[in-house]
Image (tube, helix red, strand yellow):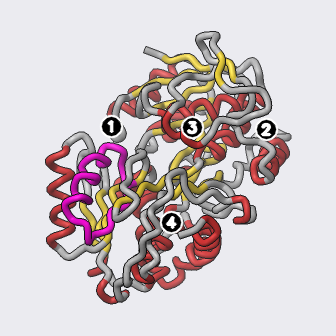
Amino acid sequence: MKKRKWSGWIAALLCGCLLAGCGAQTEIDDYATNSVDGSDEQGTESSVAGDNTTSTGIPKDEIKVGVIHLSDPAEGSGYTYTHDLGIQGMQQNLGLSDEQIVRKINVADTDAAATRTAIQECIDEGCNIIFTTSWGYMETTAEMAEEYPDIYFSHGTGYMSNGKNFNNYFGRIYQARYLSGIVAGMNTETDKIGYVAAMDSENSEVTGGIDAFALGIYSVNQNAEVYVKVTNSWFDPEGEKAAAQTLLDMGCDVIAQHCDTEYPQTLAQERGVYSIGYNSDMSKNAPDACLCSVIWNWSAYYTAAVQSVIDGTWDGSNYYGGMTENLVGITALADFCADGTEEKVEEAKKQILAGENGVFDGVIETNTGETVGEAGKTLDDATITGGINWYFKNVTVVE
């Protein structure tokens, strides 16, 4: 599909996502938070184009969707929970039955054999499109896409695809991270801000998010420092809890996260300090601590992807949406945010949507004293998704 077609799908389907909960068997309470202003005219469809091949389509009543989850979506408010909200939204938007959705939960993305087994079970149960939602599933998904060329595979995060029956989907979450950094920078009193990170600087997805957050902080508060504690796991409840405790013990009075559980939020509330949620609206977990949450609206992508298989318009293109496509954003700010926070966020948001702020703009100083980027330019998508292996100058990694 071409750029405008994907962008239009995402923008249009957001409206369906906001309304989808009305007929649901169980209420999905996060749809109403996944609203971001902006036009789809500036959208970027992908970083790697497909080969523009199309199929004859699959009748809707013959569609069966598989999804591989890292954890149990019923057990939290984080990454897996939010992806499953997207799957539920897609199901409701397209009118699919429960029997047309196959979920495989608690599949460790560090276990290639378990990943292969879960995908094979989806295939054996008749799935004709399979979403694998975590970074570590990538290589196994790529292998199985080659083995089963008539099945569609779509992998979340990562970078691999074959331009045919295997694509990659992710988003410009760094845009929302930047806005949440403004919130953190405006609300810290100790100028110590914590960040629980799943992976270290070798992973550009996590590191780019940290840097965007740190740049947002620096734009409003040049005295604040960001302290990062890495868990080295995409899902590790005990490790995430311990990391959050370490940062809070250091005196961090705002804590953000790129991890699955809500421990950074609930521990911040216990300590009487602030937090920035991730994936879904985490104010429900920590109503007295959560300043805002960085959120995904995955249902917009999942609906468009499955619809393209039904229509026969799937072409293997990768998807890389952002605030313009309503894929990412931040929730409304808590009413206890410092005066002026909302105004600063809105100002930056308008600049991002207008293309005046690319977040990674100009010459950027790292925490080792080196520089990246060029004056008058912004980092390209390939660098942002695969080449950010450095930290901004106000970031310190806690061992």
Q: Secondary structure at mark 1?
A: loop
- How many neighbours does mark 2 have within 10 angstroms: few (below 14), some (14-19), or many (20 or more)? some
Q: Earlier in the sequence, mark 2 or mark 3?
A: 2
**Drawn side of residue 166 relative to residue 207, left or right:** left
Residue under label 3, please give it: 384
Magenta includes 243? no
**Which of labels 4 and 3 is toward the front?**
3
How many marks are shown on the rendered structure? 4
- Whole-number angstrom distance, CA of label 4 to CA of label 3: 21 Å
**Would you say the residues marked 4 and 1 are in contact, meaning their CB atoms lie under 8 Å apart?**
no
Please provide the residue range marked out in magenta: 133-155
The three-letter code of the residue at mark 1 reads: Asp
Q: Earlier in the sequence, mark 3 or mark 1?
A: 1
- How many neighbours does mark 1 have within 10 angstroms: few (below 14), some (14-19), or many (20 or more)? some
Foreground pick, 154 / 36: 154
Q: Secondary structure at mark 4?
A: helix
